[in-house]
Image (tube, rainbow, N blue to C red):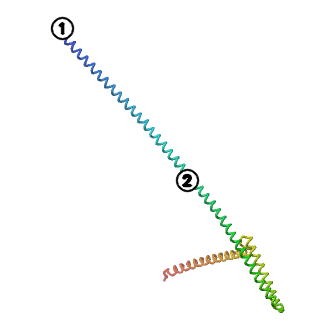
Amino acid sequence: MKKLLFSILIVVVLIASGTALAKGGKGKGKGKGEKAEKKLEEKKSEERQEIEQKQNDEEKKEKKNKKEKKQKRERESKQSRVREGKVEKSSGGAEAQVKKSKKGKGKKSQSIEEQIAHEKSKHGTRMAKLAKIKGLAADNEKTMARIDKLIAKENKRYEKKIQKMNQKKQGGGVSKEELNAAEKKGKSKAKDKAKRAEESQSNKVKDKANKVKGKAKKAEESQPIEE
């Protein structure tokens, strides 16, 4: 009887310990599975973050490139507009200069023509007066000779004046005589300038020599006299 009870007790203990061991094994397995799942989720989240970061970086890079290209296009368009503006300004300035020169030439030619017309009327008035005086002094030979001289002188003056004006008209308002005179004047001015430069140079040299002499004299005076 005692043996039977003891054997039943052992069987109960063995069954209880077996069930406990089975429960412990299930718990450990479950814990390991949860850890593995956590690690897997963490790994997946890291990968997702890396992918998102790469996408963000690429988007930023693309935006930056687009911005740089836009700025470059704006700079190029601005430079082209500036160049076009400069060309237009230069062409406009050239056209204005041409117009101005043409206008100036027109004014000069008009003023010369007016001078010629004035000179013709002046000559005609003088010749008419001389002819009238000559008609009145027909009996006086001396007066007639004197009037003839005046007429010849007036004709000579008129021809010379008209010739000079025509030369001005043809040569852009400047006669050969005036050009020669201007050239001579320029040469004389250049000579005077060279002469003044030589004089100023010689004066500078003299001043330097005088300064050196003065310094030498002062040095001699400042030296002590030996007894």
Label 1, residues with CA under 10 Å away: few <14, some 14-19, many ≥20: few
The amino acid type found where label 2 is placed reads: Lys
What is the spatial separation of the Cα atoms under label 1 and label 2, in whole angstroms? Answer: 111 Å
Earlier-in-chain disc, 1 versus 2 = 1
Q: Residue at x 67, y 76 (%)?
A: 189
**Image coords of residue 52 (percent x, y):** 43, 37
**Image coords of residue 178 (percent x, y):** 72, 75
Please give the residue where the numbered disc 1 appears in the rendered image.
4
| Quarter where residue 144 is shown | bottom right
**Viewer-side residue, 143 vs 175:** 143
The amino acid type found where label 1 is placed reads: Leu
**Image coords of residue 23 (percent x, y):** 27, 20
**Viewer-side residue, 152 vs 39:** 152
Secondary structure of residue under mark 1: helix
Instruction: Name the quarter where the N terminus is drawn.
Output: top left
Label 2, residues with CA under 10 Å away: few <14, some 14-19, many ≥20: few
Vertical comparison of 129 with 52: above or below: below
Secondary structure of residue under mark 2: helix
Is residue 1 rendered to the left or right of residue 163?
Answer: left
**Image coords of residue 60 (percent x, y):** 46, 42
Q: Residue at x 74, y 76 (%)?
A: 117
| Quarter where residue 186 is shown | bottom right
Of badges 1 and 2, the one in the foreground is 2
Q: Which mark is residue 78?
A: 2
Vertical comparison of 2 with 129: above or below: above
Q: Residue at x 48, y 45 (%)?
A: 64
Is residue 127 rendered to the left or right of residue 66?
Answer: right
Is residue 11 rendered to the left or right of residue 136?
Answer: left
